[in-house]
Amino acid sequence: NYPNPFNPITCIEFDNLNYNLLKINIYDTNGNLIQELVNNYYNPGSYKVYWDGSNFSSGIYLYELEVSNQLLRKKMVLIK
């Protein structure tokens, strides 16, 4: 994601190689689901998804991208 740290919006950019169900979820550091950002089928291509953290407190959050039973987890920092 970029920018990282961010205030209050960050962009999560990804490439999709096949027609797949793609999910992006946002979690706090305790593992609680904060927001389901994406749960949709995507055609092959490059995409950008934006997360607006203006309703959340400053801190560390994790996003999890799931596609074809593969997971990618990354840390992001919201600074207000």
Image (tube, helix red, strand yellow):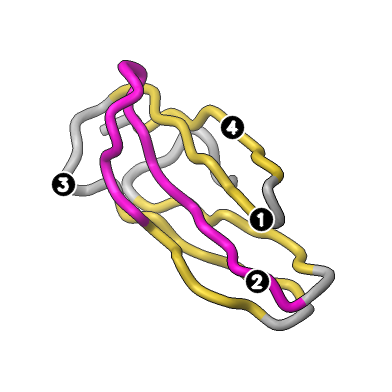
The percent position of residue 62, horizontal first and vertical second, equals 46, 31
Q: How far apart are labels 3 and 4 at the CA level? A: 20 Å
Q: How far apart are labels 1 and 4 at the CA level? A: 15 Å
Q: Amino acid at mark 4?
A: Lys
Q: How far apart are labels 2 and 3 at the CA level? A: 24 Å
Which disc, if any, is residue 74?
Answer: 4
Q: How far apart are labels 1 and 2 at the CA level? A: 14 Å
Vertical placement of residue 30 versus 40, above or below: above
Q: Residues within 10 Å of mark 4 (few under 14, many from 20)?
A: few
Stretch in magenta: 19-36
Which disc, if any, is residue 47?
Answer: 2
Is residue 3 or residue 38 the one in the foreground?
38
Residue drawn at x 68%, y 71% is 20
Q: Residues within 10 Å of mark 2 (few under 14, many from 20)?
A: few
The percent position of residue 49, horizontal first and vertical second, equals 51, 65
Q: Left of 80 or right of it: where is 21?
A: right
Is residue 75 or residue 66 the one in the foreground?
66
Q: Residue furthest right?
A: 17
Which disc, if any, is residue 55?
Answer: 3
Q: Left of 76 or right of it: where is 19?
A: right
Please state which of the two labelled residues, at mark 1 or mark 4, is closer to the viewer: 1
Residue pointed to by mark 1? 67
Q: Are marks 1 and 2 in contact (CB under 8 Å)?
A: no
Q: Are marks 1 and 4 in contact (CB under 8 Å)?
A: no
Q: Left of 17 or right of it: where is 78?
A: left
- Nearest to N terminus: mark 2 or mark 4: 2
Q: Residue furthest top?
A: 30
- Nearest to N terminus: mark 1 or mark 3: 3
Q: How far apart are labels 1 and 3 at the CA level? A: 27 Å
